[in-house]
Image: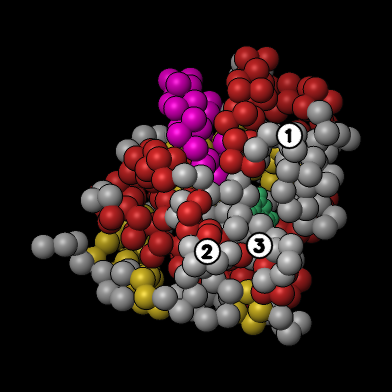
Amino acid sequence: MPTERLVLRRPDDWHVHLRDGAMLKAVLPFTARQFGRAIVMPNLKPPVATTADAVAYRERILAAVPAGVSFTPLMTAYLTDGTDPDDLAQGFEDGVFAAAKLYPANATTNSAHGVTDIAKITPVLERMAEIGMPLLIHGEVTDQAVDIFDREAVFIDRTLAPLLERHKALRVVLEHATTAEAVAFVRDHAASGRVGATITAHHLLINRSHIFQGGIRPHLYCLPIAKRETHRQALLEAAISGEGPFFLGTDTAPHPLTAKESACGCAGCFTAANALELYAEAFEQAGALDTLEAFASLNGPRFYGLPVAEEKVVLERSPSTAPDIVLIADGDGVLPFRSGETLNWTFVGAA
Ligand code: DOR
Ligand code: ZN
């Protein structure tokens, strides 16, 4: 008899793109409906680079939370070559920043202001290690000579491993891990308690062949790009393991439909509309619904040193339909991942 009802401590999303303006208003309610807290990515245009930027952005996010919904945005700083260590540390100590995000310059969407050479932010990283501020990493090399499917594994060898050697107390999260190499690397450092990894729902559900199934499917294109099936299997095995360093981060990354369905479509999957249903599906396929709560609700808060949620939410094993296009106030829309398709699970709400 399959599980018909899942009751979990209210999960958190440790990696979201909420955007700004009309897009923020359109997408935030989806994240706030399912998750109690979320680590908010800072790659706006211009980026959320200073404590003052983050205070202002947090206000705009809170103003977009629907009445009666409790949701805590956890803010991050976008590191640049010019990040001021004093401002960053002040922001962390004042509780404005939960972490800082490292985008290698030009690795992905809105990363043009990212770090051009990690050596340039050595004083920033030393300070972060000192105060226990986590570094969240987009782990891909930007060397265009490296094959797109290898950029994460090469980043681990060339940048991440030496970084952890140089900064022995720095705490890092390898965001949206997509490879077996990432899983192995995180496990190798598990004993130190200073390395974590988020895993998206889409990387648990698709491999690279899905992106080209019957034609090119722009809504399955994200960065880091989905890898071959063996990597999906490794990610799934890590996610369902219950091991502390692996936790939920959707990387929900909405883009207007016109920017996705274009000759040069943007990277990002909008999974917030049914994130928990998608994770439940992946865990169920792996026969591991019993470890979903550790992955979704326990491991993340423990890594970040935050309390686990007391509230609970319910998922039911009944079909739901991924919503149709979500209209943005300015006339365009965002298409949810698996839009119009039937999912096996339904998010019911608070227990
Ligand atoms: O697919 C992605 N979309 N990957 C990222 O790293 C950034 C994100 C975005 O902001 O759209
Ligand atoms: Zn992201």
How many numbered dots are placed on residues in this image? Answer: 3
Q: Of label 2 and label 3, which has the lower sequence position?
A: 3
Mark linked to residue 178 = none
Q: Earlier in the sequence, mark 1 or mark 2?
A: 1
Residue 186 magenta-highlighted: yes
Image spot of residue 272 (x, y percent):
53, 65
Q: Mark 3: few, some, or many residues within 10 Å (few <14, many ≥20)?
A: many
In the rendered image, the quadrant that contains the C terminus is: bottom left
Whether ligand 1 has any atom under 8 Å from the Cβ at mark 2 is answered as: no
**What residue sits 73% from the left and 67% below the top?**
263
Mark in front: 1 vs 2: 1
What residue did someone put label 3 on?
Answer: 18
Which residue is located at x 77 percent, y 27 percent? 118
Q: Write down the region rendered in magenta.
A: 174-196
Q: Residues within 10 Å of mark 2 (few under 14, many from 20)?
A: many
| SS of the residue under disc 2 | loop
Q: Which amino acid does label 1 sit on?
A: Ala
Q: Is residue 152 left or right of residue 307?
A: right
Instruction: From the image, tell me which residue sits under label 1.
Output: 145
Tell me the element at label 1.
Answer: loop
Q: How is the image coloured?
A: secondary structure
Lateral position of residue 337 relative to residue 259, left or right: left
Q: Position of residue 150 (x, y in %)?
A: 60, 35
Task: Look at label 2 and name its amino acid.
Answer: Thr
Identify the residue position indicated by label 2 in the image: 271
Q: Nearer the viewer, residue 76 or 235?
A: 235
- Quarter of image, res 220: bottom right
